Image: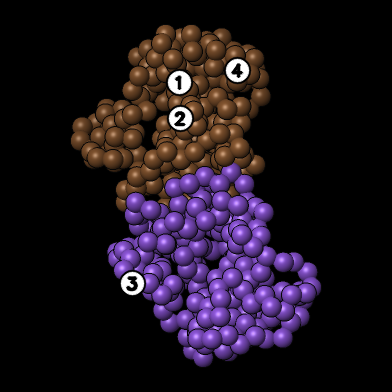
Chain colours: A brown, B purple
């Protein structure tokens, strides 16, 4: 069975998954990079960015796990682009350069149609205007028996959680305050939706929590 | 200089400091006990409750620190009593029995006057109807050069944080979901108020964060 999995989703200790004021220079909003500091030293992140070395251990294991057994990905439009509304700049193909780190079909939720874009390394961006259920159906077909990774951002994860469509979620709470931004859980009653914290482990850089649907 | 300190303030991983539906059987609201599980096995908690034994180490150190150098305490009314409105039951003297664990003057924020109550072991409950600033002034005088502990609950801590009156805050994030309840940080921009996370350490039971005002 194909699972819908969230991995490496970082929030500040006051609950924000991204800062405000996203633009080309601040893909995660102002201050948003601070919540991802547990990722950057890891070996898996070094490999992803074409470098040797990096730390091994718990943080590295958690980051690497987000790429295992994944056959397709789902993204919100704001995680793909700093623009809003109609697609007016055809040269924008995401933040990640010619060879994005997905290496799978990627289904991008948007209200504005755009032709698919084939990138290097196995990533193809598909733009889905029919909502979260259709995006998940298409991603599930494309995953061919592997799992689908829900890559974010905050608003997209909130929609899939609220619809009880997320099967497991790895959350990393970083020891920083953001003060403002996009709050992950406000207004979402995860207990009522049937989720629980199944496992947790902390490192000097983050507290990792595994949230899953009760069976 | 007398500091206003918060200690051992526990929240769920989705940010709630207490559950809903407080009553005599549920002083922390329904489900609220779950966020305090890191406290109960500790030696300091055992001592507080008149028992031998208990765990030592990080969790115990954090719990014990909340009682060091404290000369007075401040409580919100809902942390003192499950009732609301006028004081109609004079026999209610808090959740803690004849010898409460404060051992200092305790200033209770309420809109409803009530005479002070002297308890065993050095605890005296004073009821303050003039708001958070007056309560802090009276507690500071009573502390005689020691610090004042802001003991909770959520609404009271939120008021003092919003007024920038809290000097340091020890927050314990527990690996549980509450789903609903009293959210500690919603609508409070701690960064704008001048707070930062200065230190953090995790145990299998909780992630401890020290939040302090930038100097």
The residue sitting at 61% across, 87% down in the picture is B118
Mark 4 lies on a secondary structure that is helix
Decide: is B152 above or below A93.
below
Would you name the residue on which mark 4 appears?
A133
In which chain is the residue bearing label 4? Answer: A
Q: Give the Cα distance between marks 4 and 2.
A: 17 Å
In which chain is the residue bearing label 2? Answer: A
Whether discs 2 and 3 lie on one chain: the answer is: no
The residue nearer to you, when weighing B60 against A89, is B60
Residue A21, image x and y in percent? 58, 42
Would you name the residue on which mark 2 appears?
A168
Whether discs 4 and 3 lie on one chain: the answer is: no
Whether discs 4 and 2 lie on one chain: the answer is: yes
The residue mark sitting in front, 2 or 3, is 3
The residue sitting at 72% across, 66% down in the picture is B83
Would you name the residue on which mark 3 appears?
B52
Disc 4 vs disc 2: Cβ atoms closer than 8 Å? no
């Amino acid at each position: 069975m194909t699972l819908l999995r969230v991995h490496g989703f970082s929030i500040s200790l006051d609950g924000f998954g991204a800062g405000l004021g996203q633009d080309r220079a601040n893909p995660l909003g102002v201050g948003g990079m601070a919540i991802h500091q547990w990722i950057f030293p890891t070996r898996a992140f070094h490999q992803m960015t074409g470098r040797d070395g990096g730390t091994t251990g718990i943080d590295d294991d958690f980051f690497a796990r987000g790429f295992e057994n994944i056959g397709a990905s789902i993204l919100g439009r704001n995680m793909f682009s700093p623009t809003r509304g109609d697609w007016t700049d055809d040269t924008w193909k995401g933040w990640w350069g010619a060879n994005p780190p997905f290496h799978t079909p990627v289904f991008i939720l948007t209200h504005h149609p755009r032709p698919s874009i084939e990138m290097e390394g196995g990533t193809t961006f598909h733009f889905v205007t029919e909502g979260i259920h259709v995006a998940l159906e298409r991603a599930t077909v494309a995953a061919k028996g592997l799992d689908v990774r829900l890559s974010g951002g905050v608003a997209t994860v909130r929609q899939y959680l609220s619809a009880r469509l997320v099967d497991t979620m790895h959350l990393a709470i970083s020891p920083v305050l953001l003060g403002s931004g996009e709050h992950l859980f406000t207004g979402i009653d995860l207990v009522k939706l049937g989720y629980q914290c199944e496992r947790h482990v902390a490192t000097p850089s983050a507290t990792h929590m595994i949230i899953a649907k009760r069976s």
